[in-house]
Image (cartoon, rainbow, N blue to C red):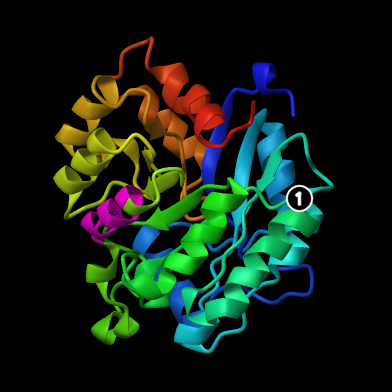
Amino acid sequence: MDLDNLVAIDVHTHVHADLHGHKALDDELNEAASAYFKGDPYDPTVPDIAADYRAGNMAAVVFTVDVEHATGHPALSNEEIADLAAQHPDVLIPFASVDPARGAAGVRLARRLVEQHEVRGFKFHPSIQAFEPNDRAVYPLYEELQGLGVPALFHTGQTGIGAGLPGGRGIKLRYSDPMLLDDVAADFPALTIIMAHPSVPWQDEAISVATHKANVYIDLSGWSPKYFPPQLVKAANGLLKHKVLFGSDYPLIRPERWIRDFAALDIKDEVRPLIMKENAIRALGLR
């Protein structure tokens, strides 16, 4: 990967389908998410993502979310995603997803994915996976990730998955309160934690955690920058200028749209390259 010549690194993109036509979410959740984000339905495979980001001279972190235990919908294959991403090393950085409900088997799986498939990090969605991030039962998995030296990316705040459905399809927002990650960051100081999204309605809490814990970052995915809370813009411009990362939430938000709206945001010229690429290089350990 030619880091010097890349325009940006998007740390938050979703693989929505495998090469066999299986989708990451069931039709009801997929349709609700598309309606929430007001986007065109698009279910990209790994090669689709590689083509899209190569065309924009950007790199992307790619992953699925393992929600099989909570929803009954079979997960996409982490191994397939990683192996396909390895065919596009100039633009793709593979993450995996292991549901904490998998217990000891999930811990063994995480190690195998890193050692045999060169996975570079792990994605968690506490609301959909229905777990509290600071639950001690999950700590053996974090211990493994810390030992492997790979980051953990957690969804925080509101989610478009299940939005507008009766009862939100049973998805509970409280699991994605960033204050639950403060415990994890304190107990695993060598584990890099990325809090995904503007953490509405807990934005101040997310800023506080990222300010206090050296191992915690914030990615800006899932929202158009024109809707960012003002305190997040202020923090990104100053106190957290080295802790904030570009992320789109592709394909629900396309990077072109995000970057266009970000260009109109009042961000200092010297901070923009930090957010778009340099902070991700450090957080992901790319050099």
Whether residue 45 is visible to the viewer of this picture, yes or no, is no
Q: Position of residue 116 (x, y in %)?
A: 79, 58
For the point 62% across and 63% down, the residue is: 43
Of residues 40 and 49, which is closer to you in this image? 49
Whether residue 251 is visible to the viewer of this picture, yes or no, is yes
Q: Position of residue 3 (x, y in %)?
A: 67, 23
Residue at the farthest top position:
270
Neighbor class of circle 1 (other Cα within 10 Å; few <14, some 14-19, many 20+) is many
Query: Is residue 179 found inside the magenta-colored segment of the image?
Result: yes
Quarter holding residue 173: bottom left
Magenta stretch secondary structure, dominant: helix
State which quarter of the image contains the C terminus: top right
SS for tag 1?
Answer: helix
Left or right position of 51 against 277: right
State which quarter of the image contains the N terminus: top right
For the point 47% across and 60% down, the residue is: 142
Q: Is residue 46 above or below residue 254?
A: below
Of residues 158 and 206, which is closer to you in this image? 206
Query: Is residue 264 found inside the magenta-colored segment of the image?
Result: no
Of residues 238 and 146, which is closer to you in this image? 146
For the point 52% across and 28% down, the residue is: 282
Q: Which residues are magenta?
A: 177-186
Q: Position of residue 68 (x, y in %)?
A: 54, 82
For the point 37% across and 68% down, the residue is: 126
Circle 1 sits on which residue? 85
Quarter holding residue 61: top right
Q: Is residue 12 above or below residue 137?
A: above
Residue at the farthest bottom position:
72
Count of residue discs:
1
